[in-house]
Image: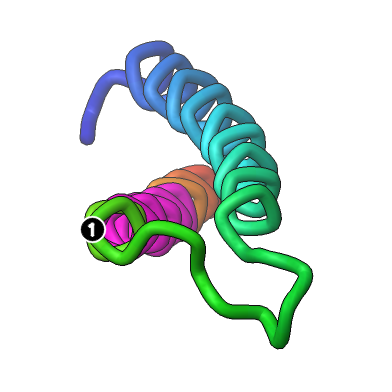
Amino acid sequence: MENKRAINEIIEQAKKIEDNNWNNLECVTSIDLLLTSEDYSSTKDNTLEKNFIKLKEKIEDVNSLTKSLLSKLVKDNEHESIH
Protein backbone atom coordinates (compact mmCIF):
# COMPACT_ATOMS: atom_id res chain seq x y z
CA MET A 1 0.00 0.00 0.00
CA GLU A 2 1.39 3.33 -1.01
CA ASN A 3 -0.08 5.60 1.65
CA LYS A 4 2.04 5.15 4.82
CA ARG A 5 -0.39 7.15 6.93
CA ALA A 6 -3.28 4.93 5.89
CA ILE A 7 -1.37 1.70 6.49
CA ASN A 8 -0.32 2.88 9.95
CA GLU A 9 -3.92 3.72 10.79
CA ILE A 10 -5.06 0.30 9.52
CA ILE A 11 -2.45 -1.33 11.78
CA GLU A 12 -3.68 0.70 14.76
CA GLN A 13 -7.30 -0.28 14.08
CA ALA A 14 -6.32 -3.94 13.68
CA LYS A 15 -4.52 -3.76 17.05
CA LYS A 16 -7.75 -2.47 18.61
CA ILE A 17 -9.60 -5.43 17.10
CA GLU A 18 -6.93 -7.75 18.50
CA ASP A 19 -7.35 -6.22 21.98
CA ASN A 20 -11.11 -6.68 21.72
CA ASN A 21 -10.56 -10.29 20.65
CA TRP A 22 -8.72 -10.96 23.92
CA ASN A 23 -11.67 -9.52 25.84
CA ASN A 24 -14.01 -11.80 23.90
CA LEU A 25 -11.82 -14.80 24.70
CA GLU A 26 -11.93 -13.96 28.41
CA CYS A 27 -15.73 -13.81 28.23
CA VAL A 28 -15.86 -17.14 26.41
CA THR A 29 -13.73 -18.72 29.13
CA SER A 30 -16.08 -17.36 31.80
CA ILE A 31 -19.15 -18.65 29.97
CA ASP A 32 -17.47 -22.02 29.54
CA LEU A 33 -16.95 -22.26 33.28
CA LEU A 34 -20.56 -21.25 33.97
CA LEU A 35 -21.96 -23.82 31.55
CA THR A 36 -20.02 -26.65 33.13
CA SER A 37 -21.46 -28.26 36.22
CA GLU A 38 -19.30 -29.18 39.13
CA ASP A 39 -20.19 -32.85 38.66
CA TYR A 40 -17.61 -34.42 36.36
CA SER A 41 -17.46 -31.34 34.15
CA SER A 42 -20.68 -32.22 32.38
CA THR A 43 -22.67 -29.50 30.69
CA LYS A 44 -25.92 -28.41 32.25
CA ASP A 45 -27.70 -27.65 28.96
CA ASN A 46 -26.76 -29.56 25.80
CA THR A 47 -28.49 -27.19 23.36
CA LEU A 48 -26.85 -24.19 24.93
CA GLU A 49 -23.52 -25.98 24.84
CA LYS A 50 -23.80 -26.69 21.11
CA ASN A 51 -24.54 -23.03 20.36
CA PHE A 52 -21.75 -21.94 22.65
CA ILE A 53 -19.27 -24.26 20.94
CA LYS A 54 -20.15 -22.69 17.58
CA LEU A 55 -19.67 -19.21 19.03
CA LYS A 56 -16.37 -20.20 20.63
CA GLU A 57 -15.07 -21.62 17.33
CA LYS A 58 -16.02 -18.46 15.45
CA ILE A 59 -14.33 -16.27 18.06
CA GLU A 60 -11.20 -18.42 17.78
CA ASP A 61 -11.35 -18.06 13.97
CA VAL A 62 -11.65 -14.28 14.25
CA ASN A 63 -8.70 -14.22 16.64
CA SER A 64 -6.60 -16.24 14.23
CA LEU A 65 -7.59 -14.15 11.21
CA THR A 66 -6.92 -10.90 13.05
CA LYS A 67 -3.50 -12.11 14.15
CA SER A 68 -2.68 -13.17 10.60
CA LEU A 69 -3.87 -9.87 9.13
CA LEU A 70 -1.94 -7.81 11.66
CA SER A 71 1.20 -9.85 11.11
CA LYS A 72 0.97 -9.33 7.33
CA LEU A 73 0.29 -5.62 7.69
CA VAL A 74 3.25 -5.10 10.01
CA LYS A 75 5.54 -7.21 7.82
CA ASP A 76 4.49 -5.36 4.66
CA ASN A 77 4.86 -2.00 6.40
CA GLU A 78 8.36 -2.87 7.59
CA HIS A 79 9.25 -4.06 4.09
CA GLU A 80 8.02 -0.78 2.62
CA SER A 81 10.04 1.19 5.20
CA ILE A 82 13.24 -0.50 4.09
CA HIS A 83 12.75 0.46 0.44
Q: What's the magenta region? A: 53-71
Judged by its main secondary structure, the magenta piece is helix
**Is residue 81 left or right of 39 when viewed as pictured?**
left
User: Residue 25 placed where, x, y %?
Assistant: 59, 47
Vertical placement of 67 versus 9: above or below? below
Between 66 and 25, the one nearer to me in the picture: 25
Is residue 69 something one can see in this rendering? Answer: no
Vertical placement of 29 versus 2: above or below? below
Q: Which residue is mark 1?
A: 47
Residue 4 included in the magenta stretch of the image: no
Name which residue type carries label 1: Thr
- Which residue: 44% across, 54% down? 63
Vertical placement of 52 versus 43: above or below? above
User: Residue 56 placed where, x, y %?
Assistant: 39, 57
- Quadrant in the picture for residue 9: top left
User: Residue 30 placed where, x, y %?
Assistant: 69, 45
Vertical placement of 74 versus 50: above or below? above
- Which residue: 45% across, 48% down? 70
Between 49 and 67, the one nearer to me in the picture: 49
What is the quadrant of the N terminus in the image?
Answer: top left
Is residue 15 something one can see in this rendering? Answer: yes
**Is residue 3 left or right of 27 when viewed as pictured?**
left
**Is residue 69 left or right of 32 when viewed as pictured?**
left
